[in-house]
Image: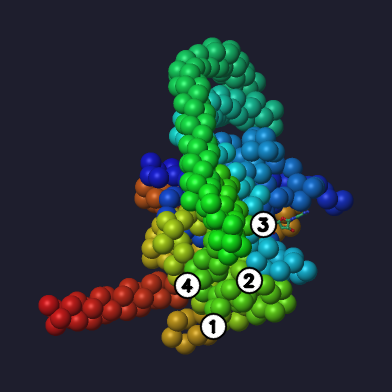
Amino acid sequence: MSEEKDKVLSVNNLVVNFRTDNGLVHAVRDVSFDVFKGETLCIVGESGSGKSVTSKAIMGILAKNAIIAGGNIMYRGENLLEVSEEEFYKIRGHKIGMIFQDPLSSLNPIVRIGKQITEAMLLNSDKLKLMYNDLISDDLIHYKNTLAKMNIAINTEKKTIDGLRDEIKHKNYKNEEDKKRDEALLKEKEEKFKTFEKETKEKYENEAKVLKEKLNETKKEAKQKVKEYKKQVNEEYKQKVENIKRNYLNVNNSDELAKKKAELKQAKVDKMDKLKITKAEAKRRAIQVMKEVGIPEPEKRYKQYPFEFSGGMRQRIVIAIALTASPEVLICDEPTTALDVTIQAQILELINRIKAERNLSCIFITHDLGVVANMADRVAVMYAGKIVEYGKAEEIFYEPKHPYTWALLSSIPDVDSKEKLEAIPGTPPNMIYPPEGDAFAARSKYAMNIDYRKQPPYYKVSDTHYAATWLLDPHAPKVEMPKIVSERIRLSLENAKKLGDISDQVENQTT
Ligand SMILES: Nc1ncnc2c1ncn2[C@@H]1O[C@H](COP(=O)(O)OP(=O)(O)OP(=O)(O)O)[C@@H](O)[C@H]1O
Ligand SMILES: [Mg+2]
């Protein structure tokens, strides 16, 4: 599922299980998706499909009984599942921010809003450190990317071999010859693997060595630059102090002395401002983001406690807190389900505006396809821990291929009549015993025999659109999507065309 575009985050073959007294819960089963710069990926699916577990895995905040049994989460050349805790801490809540469903649970009820917004800024307040990290960041990512590529290449090959070994173990062979042939193939692969691993390492290690040398050089230069900057700031300060002292050399009336004192103090503040994010600066920035997220009278609100805010305003505060760190990726897990409909629309609009202004990448989680239509550039449809369909928003809405996507589309209220037309019959499977084949088969009237036995692969619909359903197999019978879905698609395309015609007319009139 890849496309060479500006990829910011990519989740590859993620598997998450939970240990419970009743057995292992298979919550996320081999999930892969990419998040691109400035785009919103919506993850949509019924309750329990694994949406929150996926996003918590990205944030590194899974419950204690979670086992990450496979896959990787790549962010700027780092596998987030492998980075040190210290590094993860830097990324979580800074480069990747998250907004939850219930704003109250992410705010501390006994701490003033202002303090909660400035907290993170003051934690990372050393401007010299920030400057250093900025200067080395590109080379560091380059280097780490190369190492990651090497590990992924080796691990992928290893997994293929493990898979083959597993298959041989569990397969019911009709004759010994077939088994022997497969075993020989496995042996050959195992033997070739050692050379493959050695060659891959050699290939990447040479590249990595060159990049490491470059990185070390850049680090040296960066250190020097930071040192010079600090020296310059100190010298400027010294100069200023001398000037002030000279200006007030012979004064001794108290007014003038107070002025001198104030000037000296200001000089010190100016100096600190250049080295650290001071409390005053943090407050200034906090009030600025409070304005950005649409909080009226931010100076007054700054001093208030969470209970003094309405639900919608509290969610704005939570968004403000996430934004203070200037994240590159914002994960929103059902951020509006606890709010009433009008407030919901305002928060969605706010998220869309901020996303555009800051060129953010968003992962937006919802069970509501209506919300998806307003937010998504791309959509991942999740069912029973798997992504069953993935594509650009228009591909999912106008050319859906998986029966589960059809069911979701038929269950959204009609835009005109507002009535919910067809609830999805049945219930999702028990994830301790996930079905062997297409997990939706038991609820789908389009299910074929093979759906109960074998997991469908991802069939490519377009370069950006994939669906895991046997219906796309060339041998499958031709099946049309439900009338209600095709009818809605026809209507909305017609409406879109009408709107287009109207705006064309308006344009023609005005030009
Ligand atoms: N700590 C845990 N221990 C055991 N099972 C868990 C745990 N956390 C989540 N699960 C299970 O993992 C599966 C996926 O849960 P998840 O919270 O990701 O669902 P979701 O898609 O976010 O649903 P919703 O729309 O209700 O938020 C569910 O079956 C859930 O019961
Ligand atoms: Mg959830």
The residue identified by callout 1 is 342
Between residue 337 and residue 97, name the one nearer to us: 97
Between residue 78 and residue 19, name the one nearer to us: 78
The label nearer to you, 1 versus 2, is 2
Amino acid type assigned to the residue bearing label 4 in the image: Glu
* Residue 485 relative to residue 43: left or right: left
Q: Is residue 52 above or below residue 487?
A: above
Determine if residue 32 is in view. Answer: no
Report helix, strand or loop for mark 4: helix
The residue identified by callout 2 is 302
Q: CA distance from mark 2 to mark 4?
A: 23 Å
Amino acid type assigned to the residue bearing label 1 in the image: Thr
Q: Earlier in the sequence, mark 1 or mark 4?
A: 1
Determine contact: label 2, label 3, CB under 8 Å: no
Q: Earlier in the sequence, mark 2 or mark 3?
A: 3
Between residue 504 and residue 90, name the one nearer to us: 90
The residue identified by callout 4 is 349
* Quarter location, residue 187: top right
The residue identified by callout 3 is 119
The label nearer to you, 2 versus 4, is 2
Q: CA distance from mark 1 to mark 2?
A: 25 Å
Q: CA distance from mark 4 to mark 3?
A: 27 Å
Report helix, strand or loop for mark 1: helix
